[in-house]
Image: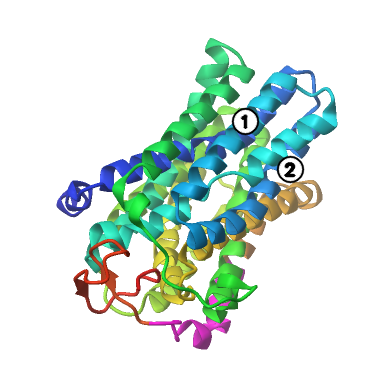
Amino acid sequence: MAAGYLDVLRARHATRLLTGTLVGRLPSGTAHIAIVLFTRAEGGSYTLAGALAAAYGLATAVGQPLLGRAVDLHGQPRVQLPAAVLSALGMALFALVGLEPLPLACLAVVIAGVCTPPLEGGLRALWPTVLGREDRVHRAYAMDAVAQEVMFTLGPLLVTVLVALWSPAVALLVINAIGVLGALSVVLSEPSRTWRSAPREAHWLGALRSPGLLALLGSFFFVGMALGSITVAGIAYADDHGDASVYGRLMAALGLGALIGGVVYGARQWAGAPERRLRVIVALLALGYLPLTLTPGVAAMTGLAALAGVFLAPAIACSFIVVDRHAPRGTVTEAFSWLVTTFGVGAAAGTALAGPAVELGGTASSFAVAGAGGVAALVVLLATGRVLAVPVRTATVVTGSENDRNGAVEPGFSSGHKA
């Protein structure tokens, strides 16, 4: 198992790109908690803190596909680094100005969100160029999904440490400065500098003109909804048991399950169409969410949370392959960015739905939102099976730069951004 991952990491530029992307995404992965902590420290209410965090999330959802399209049109360095700097400046303005005047604080948060660089989509666009072989690219997608779980676990911890040592304002400044350094590391690398998207058909819909991609986005909206609802349901469960630490235990178990599932999934070579495999994984994901509605004792619930997380990273990793196969030519970064946006909007919707569910039907009802989201995600995949069965193209992995028209190719893998 470890040998396969070491093979990926030994590839030239692979470790730098993976690490740089994770570091560059640190601001977006920690913004929700950093904004809330800073707003509360400035005397703002929880309602205002939530509103500012939501504004950042919605602004990011708007900015990601737009910046992803810009990357496909103009290359990574011209878009990623300026966006990272503008995003950091927006958050720095928020940290320095505080909550007064409030319109300026809101504007700063929105700028930070809209300008969040699409590093996720950019990395996934680079993997075929850097790794070449289909099996290595698939394994890199799994590593990417696992690394996300690590970042979303360690990132908030780093914020709380910075707050404890200095202040929430310092945490905002440091986290975003680190993010710029991560983006800089990526865009100065040779693969990022030389990567070019394939020529694209001029169309205002861009990547969204692919029916298969739309089907996948519809499904992952509900996957995001399921995950978002669990965060609220977990808080309600912890309140029921009178111990705030229970929430951290449940989230850690969920992350651990995803980590294990992603590592195991990426260590194996899978045969058959990824669209068919994705339906099976999402079915298992939904099946894992449903038992959470039983809300047993803490020990059993922790085990159920770990089980519920097992198929999350595999679902995300497999979705990357499906996106790659269905993104129209020349739109791969935009397509991956749409997946990020849709997942994030779904998570926000799940958070919004779980709150009323707790008030109306108790903790079990809020976990039922997660189960319903998983089932809905599966229903979308089943209902759109014919659309997903026909990829936009069957391209190849180009082992050299996209600028190198004589690069060697390996048949049988759809890369989505090679000429």
Q: Secondary structure at mark 2?
A: helix
Residue at screen point 65% across, 42% down: 113
Tell me the quarter of the image containing the C terminus: bottom left
Q: Position of residue 356 (x, y in %)?
A: 79, 50
Question: Residue sitting at 41 percent across and 70 percent down?
Answer: 198
Which quadrant holds residue 322?
A: bottom left
Residues in magenta, as a range: 375-393
Extreme residue in the left direction = 3
Amino acid type shown at disc 2: Ala
What residue did someone put label 2 on? 55
Task: Identify whether 116 is placed above or below 103.
Answer: below
Q: In terms of image quadrants, where is residue 163? A: top right
- For label 1, the residue is 89
How far is mark 2 from mark 1, CA to CA? Answer: 17 Å
Q: Amino acid at mark 1?
A: Leu
**20 inside magenta stretch:** no
Q: Is residue 152 left or right of residue 56?
A: left
Residue 114: numbered disc: none
Q: How is the image coloured?
A: rainbow
Residue in view at x 68 percent, y 51 percent: 348
What residue sits 34% from the left and 49% below the top? 260
